[in-house]
Amino acid sequence: MALSRSCLMLMKPRSIASLPCRRMLSTTRIQLRNDTTTATTATTDGAGPLEGLRVLDLTRVLAGPYCTMMLGDLGAEVIKVENPKGGDDTRVWGPPYAENKSAEDQERGESAYFLCANRNKKSITVDMKSEGGRRLLHDLVRESDVLVENYLPGKLNKFGMGYEQLKKINPRLIYASITGYGQTGPYSDRPGYDVIIEAEAGLMHITGEPDGNPVKVGVAITDLTTGLYAHSAILAALIKRGISGKGQWIDCSLIEAQVASLANIASNYLIGGREAKRMGTSHPSIVPYQVLPTKDSFVMVGAGNQGQFEKLCDRMDMAHLKTDPRFASNPDRVRHRSELIDMLTKRFMEEPTEHWLEKLNGAGFPFAPINNIQQTFDHPQIKARELVQEVEHERAGKIKLVGPPVKYSDFKPSIRLPPPVLGAHTQEVLRDVLGYSQETIDQLRKEGAVGSH
């Protein structure tokens, strides 16, 4: 069942007084067009919880697109606004690029990077520096519930697209800003990329082998974490709007999201005054909890409590470790980390990884091989959960994408729209959402306010 537009205050303020309940569930599908609310009798069984919401996506690269993609996964209509001259930066981040299905299409294919973070979106190309482009965007703001942007603080004010400016156009607008350092403070005017923040906010310092150089995480984890924080903040702001009838400005930064994600490492410093260090795959407060070498590769073992440690000892045929006073409790094992790890390493190296995977299976504690990416997608659990979905792309034909990772009892998230070709929905959005005539659309194209795609 989808939350009604009235539940999320998607109706105009004049309708608020007539609502019988803020959190009323709807059995109808709601659509907005040209500042009006129209209900149909179509059932919403299986519909996404955000169906009926419209999101204006002014973001590029990863943190913002990841956030808006998740909103799209939940049923929101996401309109990605791109520069007519190339669009999102990641469209050219490659190789690899998807192979074009048509031999006549000699343009560079869609980049795998762009395809990973832009499902369930529509793309329009708008030159916001032009008067016609700004007017068009203001019209879209009137018809939207959420706007997400990741420009430097103050940049959009120059184009009439700042929060205070748009608030006057649509007081109900949820406006989310994603920046490197936030809207205030001495670093607020600095641009921020994931790897820069990883370095500056502690993550790179704690990542890597003890005697090695600091290294970055294998994916842009700071971007992804920030996108998740922004996503949940937008949902909370929508619920608040259901109570107040007013929108608000969300200020989300990479550096704060990264520091918040330091979790126990941050608490170790704030509470215990303990400076962190690189520990490879091991854990500062739990032993054994790390990758250990086998005869032919590696295995990851995590004994998070006393019972799991004792089960590990039994399966390893090392029951004597359970009565060794050096390893009697987790604090003891942390103090005698090197001795215990040396013993376990020698035992693990006696047999190949496959032997240990079979021997440890069903023992009652977590363990895993170190899988590469092919092995990850061949994993029986990943296949059983149907995480990978195949979609038909306009230029690339059938492509496989990682789908929404969360399951719901009342609806099945899916890839309703493949990642869009640049400007593929400009005509549709201007005509169907804004009600522009073909003459008006043609004039905007002639002026360069929208792209020719």
Image: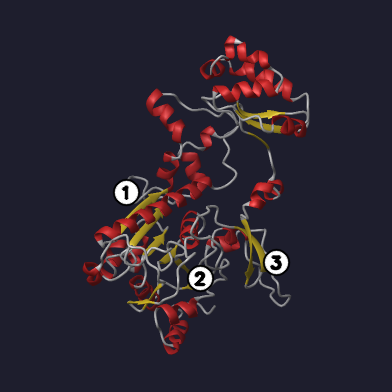
Q: Residues within 10 Å of mark 3 (few under 14, many from 20)?
A: some
CA–CA distance between discs 3 and 2? 20 Å
Q: Quadrant of residue 268?
A: top left
- Quadrant containing the C terminus in the rendered view: bottom right
Disc number for residue 184: 1
Disc number for residue 348: none
Q: Position of residue 168 (x, y in %)?
A: 25, 68
Q: Position of residue 195 (x, y in %)?
A: 52, 45
Secondary structure under the numbered disc 1 in the rendered image: loop
- Quadrant containing the N terminus in the rendered view: bottom left
Q: Residues within 10 Å of mark 2 (few under 14, many from 20)?
A: many
Q: Quadrant of residue 346?
A: top right
Residue drawn at 50 percent across, 60 percent down: 411
Residue identified by numbered label 3: 99
Going by the numbered disc 3, the residue's amino acid type is Glu
Give the mark toward the camera: 2 or 1.
Answer: 2
Is residue 276 visible to us here? yes
Going by the numbered disc 2, the residue's amino acid type is Ser
2 and 1 marks in contact (CB < 8 Å): no
Residue identified by numbered label 2: 123
Tell which circle, 1 or 3, labels the residue nearer the N-terminal end. Answer: 3
Q: How is the image coloured?
A: secondary structure
Q: Relative to residue 419, is residue 279 depicted above or below?
A: above
Tell which circle, 3 or 2, labels the residue nearer the N-terminal end. Answer: 3
Secondary structure under the numbered disc 3 in the rendered image: loop
CA–CA distance between discs 1 and 3? 44 Å
Residue drawn at 50 percent across, 77 percent down: 451
Residue drawn at 78 percent across, 23 percent down: 350
349 left or right of 321? right
Q: Relative to residue 199, is residue 437 depicted above or below?
A: below
